Image: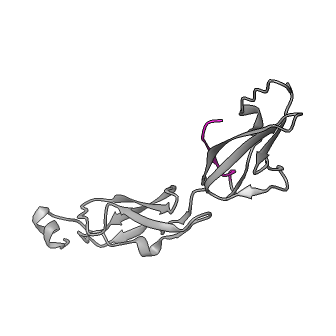
Amino acid sequence: PANDTIYTDPGFCDVGFPDFRSQATIVDDTDPNPSVFQSPAASDPLFGPFYLPGMYTITISATDSDGATGSCQFTVTVLDSVPPILNCASDQTLDCTAALPDYRNLVSANGVCATIDTITQVPAPGSVINSDTVVTFTAIDSFGISTSCTINVTLTGSLPDTTALSAGTCD
């Protein structure tokens, strides 16, 4: 069989291996039905074994009635399919502040199957805003899976012109 990629089961951090034996081409001159084995073996849906994300070598071997054997190997890559859990901040109000604060400390993120590598904020902290703005937070885990949430930032007061905006003052 060719190298393969499979994903963890939805809501779980692991996956059982399918039976790959039918994907192998086995030709034997003396035995039309040789015994075919897979290592590691196919997983039982209830009892496993189950495999975490990573790369695994699968060996398919065949033994005929004369005791002759042959085998092949291929790689199965297990990838995580479970996104991180992201708890967004509540909506925020700014009193005509021209620079957007860093709200990432108001967001919590937990990796279900992996650690959180990054939490981003868009627009970035320090960005000048002059109207109500939607801020998006994205958490990215160590497997590169992301999830996002948004908050609304509402400006109060009025900004008379761009000069006042750059000075950060309100009417």
- Quarter that holds the N terminus: top right
Residue found at the very far left of the displayed protein: 163
- Quarter of the image that includes the C terminus: bottom left
Q: Image quarter for residue 123?
A: bottom left
Q: Look at the image and name its color scheme.
A: one colour
In front: 11, or 88? 11
Left or right: where does residue 6 sit relative to residue 29?
left
Q: Which residues are magenta?
A: 1-10
Q: Is residue 56 left or right of residue 144?
A: right
Is 99 above or below relative to 143? below
Write the residue at 60% across / 40% down.
3
- From the top left corner, tell me how far across and down residue 39 is, in percent: 76, 49
Q: Quadrant of residue 23?
A: top right
* Residue 146 in picture, x, y percent from top left: 50, 56
Magenta span: helix, strand or loop, mainly? loop
Question: In this picture, is 28 found above or below 86?
Answer: above
Which residue appears farthest toward the right when viewing the image? 65
Q: Is 13 or 108 nearer to us in this picture?
A: 13
Say which of 16 and 113 sits in front.
16
Residue at figure coordinates x 26%, y 72% from the top left:
97
Residue 65 shown in magenta? no
User: Residue 81's spot in the image, x, y percent?
Assistant: 60, 52
* Residue at figure coordinates x 54%, y 68% from the top left: 115
In percent of width and height, residue 150 lies at 45, 59
What is the number of callouts on the image?
A: 0
Residue at coordinates 85% horizontally, 53% vertically from top-left? 46
The reply, left or right, for residue 137 in relation to residue 165 is right
